[in-house]
Amino acid sequence: MSFSFFKPSRGRSSPAELVKAMRDSILALDTKTAAKALEDVEKNIISMRQMLSGDGEAEPSQEQISQMALEICKEDVLSLFVQKLPSLGWDARKDLVHCWGILLRQKVDSTYCCVEYIENHLDLLDFLVVCYNNKEIALNCGSMLRECIKYPTLAKYVLESTSFELFFKYVELPNFDIASDALSTFKDLLSKHETEVSQFLSDHYEQFFELYDKLLTSSNYVTKRQSLKLLSEFLLEAPNSQTMKRYILEVRYLKTLMALLKDSSKNVQILAFHIFKVFVANPNKPREIKDILAKNHQELLMILHNLPVSKDEDEQFEEERDLIIKEIEKNSRLQSSSVSISS
Amino acid sequence: MRRAKSGSLKKTYSGLPVKTYSVSPADYQLLEEVGYGASATVYRAMYKLDNEIVAVKCLDLDRCNSNLDDIRREAQTMSLIDHPNLIKAFCSFVVEHSLWVVMPFMAQGSCLHLMKTAYPEGFEEPVIGSILKETLKALEYLHNHGHIHRDVKAGNILLDNSGAVKLGDFGVTACMFDKGDRQSSRNTFVGTPCWMAPEVLQPGSGYNFKADIWSFGITALELAHGHAPFSKYPPMKVLYGFAF
């Protein structure tokens, strides 16, 4: 039974018709009448946006939205959106990004049809990642990519793809808006899906942390500070505890954090402390870690005592700092006594 | 959220060739300071590759304690807008502890600055009308694209030598689309008290783009009198007088 009788008639085409028109106009972008086609594509994108999110007067109809999502997959228009994004105008790209998120969220007959479509066309994700190289569309593609990686299967693909390594380069791009957008995608990849992330970190431990160490020692202040913050966010998460335990056994990473404790920025110092403390508090410190802490104990104590504490810094920080100071003192006593016994 | 008219907007502004600016600090020569805020200083500067005068806003990132996400959002808003009445960031890049944001230089400064130096009693009506009209176009564009400015005031309306009017300073802009498909209400507390709508001052009540229209109204009074209503009172008094 159809209730179309109750729908406001606004002389609009149906989702299927609109998708068809969209497809034809996008395909015409490669023909001689490209200028006209571009105009049509942009018009169709505006109609799509109205159908998906309303026009301020009428609420969008859920039935039409679902149908739209289905048709877009069926007609491969989702692929065309990604491939042709660079050819679109400024506003059309923004409208498209807006629609992209809505389309991905549509659950029709208990499946996310657009997400499923992307699962079957994973090269679209690689394409979106590479777009960070294209200043014109980097931010649009970044938003689309973040919408995709809200879904665990798609995030897992990006994490394990060869494209993932590109992020270590992108977060240091000189254009701040692009670099910081890449960083927020990178952050989402490493924090949104616990199971996938912890699996990824344990499978790719060596390679990942070697690249990550370069971010922590970057000469770019933002890269250094943000990657340090992000590290404490995912490394200290319960599901990643195995990875964390492995990380805090490594002398080279301890050295990185000791250098950051001495940084000229107070924000970097404080952030570094929150990872450094885990190395020190570890009850099973390997010999080499103990040696380094003992050898540098005077300098470390001085740095720790001078850590800038802001007014709103909680008591917990003070407590932790005292604990770490005591542990370093104890360690240095034990190390020197063991040295004198063995010598 | 009317989208009906966006077709004509689009044709007017897009399709212009985009000039790219260098992201190397060596290509900019900072001349003199033209403004400053809590953690940022704005300079008039020379873009050496083109001998073009620009404004460079230098933000001390190490003074932003909480996190840099707000700054990222501001930079993105500024590079994702394209409207003749809005200050657009040409580019931004990190220089030691600071973020440099390169913007068009507005030689006449802000309306506030102009009133202070030349029109202490406010502008004449036709001038106010045209400033407000241009500002309103900027707000229409922002709202259509899902942004709330949240700090509309004479101090943020800038003028250049050709008489162009541009709304600037997106330090506090919010995105209405952050949380869902359609515009949602915001729950945070930012802006400058005298210009702020009651719902912005009332924590927890949530507000939408209408808050900018309130501030716009206060700005109209400000342009007519040379100062905003209640602006001679301390900010806390304004907060209590209005909101409670």
Image (cartoon, rainbow, N blue to C red):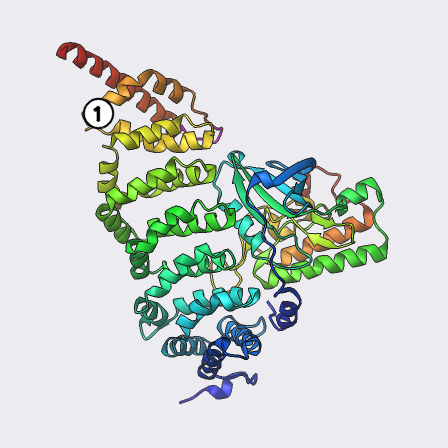
Q: Is A188 covered by the magenta stretch?
A: no
Q: Position of residue A86 (x, y in %)?
A: 49, 65
Q: Is A313 covered by the magenta stretch?
A: yes
Q: Is residue A326 above or below residue B208?
A: above
Q: Position of residue A111 (x, y in %)?
A: 31, 71
Extreme-left residue of the structure: A342
Q: Amino acid at mark 1?
A: Glu
Q: Is B177 displayed left or right of A110 in the figure?
A: right
Position of the C terminus of chain A, as image quadrant, is top left
Tell me which residue sits at (36%, 38%) in the image.
A214
Q: Is residue B163 visible?
A: yes
Position of the N terminus of chain A, as image quadrant, is bottom left
Tell me which residue sits at (44%, 67%) in the image.
A100
Question: How many callouts does the rendering have?
Answer: 1
Q: Is residue A192 visible?
A: no
Residue receiving disc 1: A288
Can you tell which quarter of the image residue B114 is in?
top right
Q: Is residue B143 above or below residue B242?
A: below
Secondary structure of the magenta portion, mostly?
Answer: loop
Give the secondary structure at mark 1. Answer: helix
Tag 1 subunit: A
Please give the range of residues in magenta. A310-315
Q: Is B31 displayed left or right of A325 in the figure?
A: right
Relative depth, front residue between A18 and B177: A18
Q: Is residue A62 above or below residue B26?
A: below
Q: Position of residue A257 (x, y in %)?
A: 34, 30
Q: Is residue B133 above or below residue B236?
A: below
Q: Position of residue A103 (x, y in %)?
A: 42, 69
Relative depth, front residue between A16 and A131: A131
Relative depth, front residue between A66 and A82: A82
- How packed mark 1 is, by other alpha carbons closer than 10 Å (few <14, some 14-19, many 20 or more), is few
